[in-house]
Image: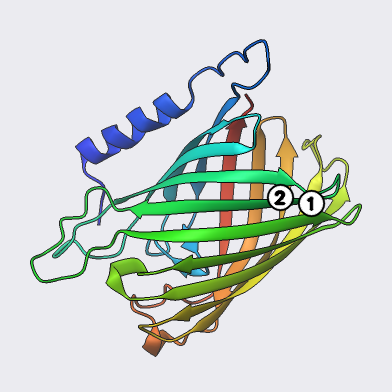
């Protein structure tokens, strides 16, 4: 399924809006900053499963952070569910509101609500709506130099009205070197593993392992992403199989 010209235009407009200049903080320092970025990835994977039919996807985001710890985020991506004869969806937009809190110099936590909106999906009569909501809690601890993280996500009615779901994910990040080739901001290795419990469908394990090299606002990420779902149980051909994912991102600081 190819994105139509008007859909591509919508994505471009939203991306340009998200890369607006950072707002100036007020005298008390409470307001700001706005940050934004964009990513071109060879495959959009969500909890191990391809949401772009193992093809490239464009993504962009914008975020506002308040000094109190509250934040808001808009993230978008092109998608391909091979549903051109039913929903004909091509865009996912995630709206997030949350709160960050530092428990100590080395430990922080986040709680947030995320609404997943499939903006152009034309839901056929009698079929379930794609849109859903998740409540997510996360914690990260800096071990120096490595850091570890954990996240739990719960939805009262998951994707396509498939009922209650819970996803638990853990991760580790380790700085490998201070510089790598022309990536003067270093190279770090990271890995994540998680489990998704579903009311409808088979529960499954997912994981990824890879490395990220950074240079200024540019980062390049290369990783292997997979699940333990058999092809016969995967809703879209081989989209649950393992694969190499290459992503190039540009993040603009506030």
Residue that carries the numbered disc 2 in the rendered image: 212
Q: Position of residue 105 (x, y in %)?
A: 86, 44
The residue at 60%/13% (across/down) is 24
Q: Residue at x 27, y 32 (%)?
A: 9
Q: Residues within 10 Å of mark 1 (few under 14, many from 20)?
A: many
Query: Residue 153: percent from the left, percent from the top?
Result: 53, 65
In percent of the image, x 60 and y 59: which residue is there? 137
Which mark sits nearer the N-terminus, 1 or 2? 1
* Count of numbered tags: 2
Q: Position of residue 109 (x, y in %)?
A: 70, 52
Toward which corner of the image does residue 179 lie, by quadrant? top right
Image quadrant for the C terminus?
top right
Q: Of helix, strand and loop, which one carries label 2?
A: strand
Q: Quadrant of the N terminus?
A: bottom left
Q: Is residue 99 left or right of residue 158?
A: right
- Indicate the quadrant where residue 83 lies: bottom left
In the picture as drawn, the residue positioned furthest to the left comes out as 125
Percent from the top left, x then y, of residue 234?
A: 39, 81
| Separation (CA) of disc 1 from disc 2 | 5 Å
* Element marked by disc 1: strand
Q: Which residue is mark 1?
A: 188
The answer to which of 122 and 158 lies nearer the viewer is 158
Q: Would you place residue 189 above or below residue 59 in this image?
A: below
Residue at 61% from the left image edge and 73% from the top image edge: 194
Contact, CB < 8 Å: mark 1 with mark 2?
Answer: yes
């Amino acid at each position: 399924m190819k994105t139509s010209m008007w859909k591509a235009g919508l994505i471009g407009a939203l991306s340009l809006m998200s890369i607006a200049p950072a707002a100036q903080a007020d005298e008390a320092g409470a307001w700001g900053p706005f940050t934004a970025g964009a990513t071109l990835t060879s495959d959009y994977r969500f909890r191990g499963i391809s949401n772009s039919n193992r093809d490239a996807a464009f993504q962009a985001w914008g975020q506002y952070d308040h000094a109190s710890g509250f934040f808001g985020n808009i993230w978008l991506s092109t998608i391909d569910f091979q549903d051109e004869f039913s929903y004909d969806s091509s865009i996912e937009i995630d709206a997030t509101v949350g709160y960050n809190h530092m428990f100590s110099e080395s430990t922080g936590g986040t709680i947030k609500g995320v609404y997943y909106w499939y903006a152009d999906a034309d839901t056929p009569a009698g079929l379930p709506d794609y849109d859903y909501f998740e409540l997510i809690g996360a914690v990260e601890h800096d071990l120096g130099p490595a850091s570890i993280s954990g996240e739990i996500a719960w939805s009262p009615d998951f994707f396509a009205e498939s009922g209650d779901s819970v996803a638990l994910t853990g991760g580790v990040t380790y700085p490998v070197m201070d510089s790598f080739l022309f990536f003067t901001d270093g190279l770090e290795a990271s890995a994540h593993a998680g489990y998704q419990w579903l009311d409808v469908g088979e529960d499954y394990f997912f994981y990824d392992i890879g490395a990220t090299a950074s240079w200024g606002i540019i980062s390049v990420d290369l990783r292997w992403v997979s699940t333990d779902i058999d092809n016969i149980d995967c809703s879209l051909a081989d989209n649950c199989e393992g694969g190499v994912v290459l992503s190039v991102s540009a993040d603009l600081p506030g």
